[in-house]
Each structure stands twice: as structure tokens, then as C-alpha cells.
Amino acid sequence: MRDLHKGSTVVSSPASPPPTAPPVSPSLLNRLSASLRHTVMLMKPVTWFAPTWAFLCGAVASGALEWSLPIIGLLAFGMVMSGPILCGLSQVVNDYCDRDVDAINEPQRLIPSGAVSTRHVQILVFFLTLIGASMALFLGREVALFVGIGLMFAFAYSLRPIRAKRNGWFGNALVSFSYEGLAWLAGHAAFGALTWPSLIIAGVYSIGAHGIMTVNDFKSMEGDAKMGLRSIPVMYGKRVAAQMVVGTMALAQIVIIGALFVWGSPVAASVIAVLLLIQVVPFVRFVRDPENNAVFFNATAIMLFVWGMMAAAIGLAV
């Protein structure tokens, strides 16, 4: 009998390839990338510095900061809450409510140009509010209180029927107290019990920051006037408004200097006095031509102003 196995070969069937995920469409990736980019642009990272810095100053003023991982982590957590989350939220709300004015002043911006939809804005506002409120509660009841007040200020600034930004005095006050005073107090409360000197310093710097908020109004005078927004430059003209900016900033720093001397912090007071003297040059240039010197003013006078905040915080802490 013939051996049926002789010379026979075994042919194995090729292994079936493992299942693979369907390729991601390049168009989908492009849309996701554009959506993320637009989200960050709406939140305006350049504006995050002010409340982040104020939170840091308040934390320093508490005298409770130390070089330990838990404390530094908590500080970073609060700074992210103050800047990217809550300040970013206020910028998104403001941009949406300003879409008609921006259609005149800056029609290329995301919302008036149609690059960002209303649904995108609504989803972003919801999640930023939820995240910001949750972070504040984690930091404590007092921090949550200051954050709650700041959120009310932010919505009152932009939303109808209040829309406080229609008046430069009221609107700028809400922003300056949110970005400087409330952020400072939240930073202090996150690490220690509030003190009267810290409350006073936070309030005075908020008044000084009122002038800083006016700097941004010079570039949009035409659109503001057409839309009935009574900003400080629209109400008083460029030169008077510029004088009010530098006068408010200078007066606030003079009060801080005097208070620190009285409270026994002469070194911090002297540092702020020197910083104020250096600001005289940008003050003069800004009053002469506020529109063309706004960038220089931001990089010099305002930066020196905020460095003075840190000097005051250190003076309170020691």
C-alpha cells in the first residue's frame, strides 16, 4: 500500500492580521486642532498674568508659604484656578458679549468672523465655570466665597441687563477688584487667616489697577462710542483719560508706601517708592500719546506697579 503520508506537505493557512483601529481622518484631526487652538485663543493667555500674580502675592502676604512639595503644589493649583480657568472664563464671556462691538473694531476676531460657534462658547463657559468652582471649593470656603463674588463680577461686567462695561467707572472697577483684590484675598485665604493690612493692601491695589484697566480702552474708542459704551477715554477724551490712568496708579502706590511705613515695613515701602520714581518716565510718555505708547507703558509702568505688589506682600509677611 502506498503511504499516503509520504511526500505529503502540510500547508498552513496564513494567520489573519490583527484587527486595527480605523484610521483617524486628517480632516477630523485638523478640526480638533483648530478647536483647541481657538479655545485657547478665546481664553487669552496674555490676560492670565494679573490674577495669577495677585493670587501669588496674597499667598506670600499670608506668611505661610514654605518650600515643601504640598505647599508649592497647592500654590500652583490656586494660580491655575485664578489665571487659566477663571480669568480665561471671564475672557470667553466678554468676547461673546462683545461680538457686536468687535464686528466694528476687530471683525477678524474669532466670534464675529464666525470661526467659533455659539455652541462652542456655551460648552466652554459651562466647563470652565464647573472646574473653577470645584477648585475653589477644594481650597476652602473663604476662597470659594471670593471666587463666587469674582464670577458674579465677571458676568455682571459683560452680560445684559447689567453690562457694567457700558460705564468705564463701574465696569473697570469690577475687573480691577476681581483681577487684583479678590485674587489677592483668595491667595491669602488659601494659606492663612486674613489680616486687616492684607485686606487694605488688596483694596488699594485694586483701585490702582482701575487705571490699568483703562489702558485697554484707548484702542477701541471708535467702536465703543458707536455702541454706546461710555469708557473713560470716550467720556473724557484721550489726554484727560491718560492723566487719570497715571494719577490713579501713582496715588495707590503712595498710599501703600505710607501704610507700609506705618506698619513697620520701611524696606518694602522704600522699594515701592523707587519703583514709583522709575515710572515717571513712562507716565509722561503715556500722557503725551496714550495710543502709540500703550505697549511701552504696559512693559514698563504696569510691570513696575505689579513688582511693587510683590514687595508689599513680602513686607506684610516678614
Image (cartoon, rainbow, N blue to C red):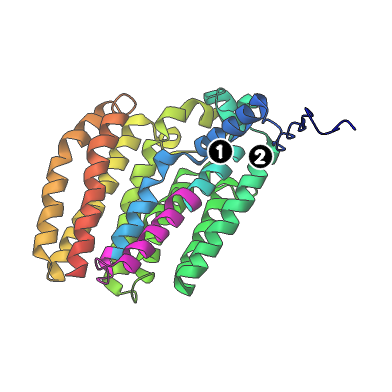
The residue depicted at 18 percent of the width and 40 percent of the height is 279
Q: Which mark is residue 39?
A: 1
Measuring from the top left, give residue 230's x and y in whole percent.
50, 38
Residue ID for mark 2: 120
Of the pair 204 and 64, the residue shown nearer to us: 64
Measuring from the top left, give residue 305's x and y in whole percent.
24, 47
Circle 1: residue type: Thr
Callout 1: SS: helix
Q: Which mark is residue 314?
A: none
Q: Which residues are magenta?
A: 60-85
Q: Quadrant of the N terminus?
A: top right
Of the pair 190 and 27, the residue shown nearer to us: 27
The residue depicted at 39 percent of the width and 56 percent of the height is 79
Q: Residues within 10 Å of mark 1 (few under 14, many from 20)?
A: some
Callout 2: SS: helix
Measuring from the top left, give residue 116's x and y in whole percent.
63, 32
- Give yes or no for contact between labels 1 and 2 (Cβ–Cβ under 8 Å): yes
Query: For this view, does 34 lie left or right of residue 117?
Result: left
Q: Quadrant of residue 299?
A: top left
Query: For this view, does 250 lie left or right of residue 214?
Result: left
Q: Is residue 214 visible?
A: yes
Of the pair 261 and 51, the residue shown nearer to us: 51
Q: Please determine whether, in this image, residue 133 is positioned above or below residue 238.
A: below
Q: Quadrant of residue 281?
A: top left
Q: Quadrant of the C terminus?
A: bottom left
